[in-house]
Image (cartoon, grey):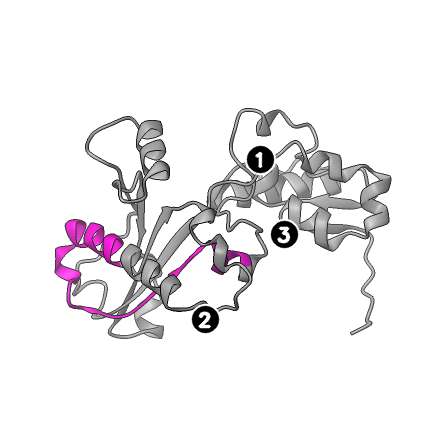
Amino acid sequence: DGHVFKAKNIVSSAGIVTTYTTLLPEATVIKHKLNKQLQQVKPSVAHVSLYLGLEGTPEALQIPKTNQWIYPAEGDHDTCVDNYLNDLSQPFPVVYISFPCAKDPDWSNRYPGKSSIDIITLIPYETFEKWSDTSWKKRGDDYEAIKENITNRLLTELYKQLPQVEGKIVHQELSTPLTTKHFVNYQTGEIYGLDHTPSRFRQPFLKPRTPIKNFYLTGQDIVTAGVAGALFSGVLTSIAITGKNILSKV
């Protein structure tokens, strides 16, 4: 709305691609040749996430606190990924199941008699790319049919692990790479920012300090994926800004 907020130091945790392509002035990007940096990295894999709401407490439904990582019984991981990307009817190469309700000590006070489960797997952005110009919640029947198929397959994997929750689900909603693009502005629906290849970790510019004075990066792109990587990036950025090594305190 025209308001300007000034600070000595500015930190972006929006991801290096979003930061350099949409948040910084184009003249600044050109001056520091930041666009050339972006040519050295690629996005990570896209994903779908199934969000489930259930009737019943985590205790009554015997929902565990630990995350579950489900892999095919046969084949090495890279082969399973390749087979799946070439033919999506093949088994999911990995299914991640998480139980936020069971981990939250205050859950039952805020949501009595309820539980929640998240299920994630990878999927190529190209699967949904032809709907990229449509609007959220208005992408058509064919799009919804693909979502329903994936949802049912993920539920099958869930029931193998927790058969007792079948029949207890009262709400289900699947996000696609287009959902991620809509809400997080990751252009190909990537789940983990930059791709985690050996070359990515050799890039000298993926660090808190940037060529722009008093402008810093943080988040998973300067460390690695996941909660731990993102959290630790904040420590590194704090050290870069203050010049104080706070690792021992952390």
Depth check, front residue: 206 or 131: 131
Say which of marks 3 and 2 sits in front.
2
Would residue 132 be found to the left or right of residue 21 on screen?
Answer: left
Label 3 vs label 2: CA separation?
A: 24 Å
Among numbered discs 1 and 3, the one appearing first in the sequence: 3
Discs 3, 2 touching: Cβ within 8 Å: no
Among numbered discs 2 and 1, the one appearing first in the sequence: 2
Residue 175 covered by magenta stretch:
yes
Residue occupying the point 15% across, 62% down: 166
The circle on residue 248 is 1
Residue occupying the point 24% across, 74% down: 113
> Which image quadrant is residue 241 in?
top right
Residue 193, percent from left and from top:
55, 44
The circle on residue 67 is none
Residue 177, percent from left and from top:
47, 54
Image quarter of the C terminus:
top right
Which region of the structure is painted magenta? 152-181
Report which residue position mark 3 lands on.
14
Q: Does 205 sit above or below residue 169? A: above
**Mark 3 Cα shell of 10 Å, populated few (<14), some (14-19), many (≥20):** some
For the residue labelled by badge 3, is the local secondary structure a helix, a strand or a loop?
Answer: loop
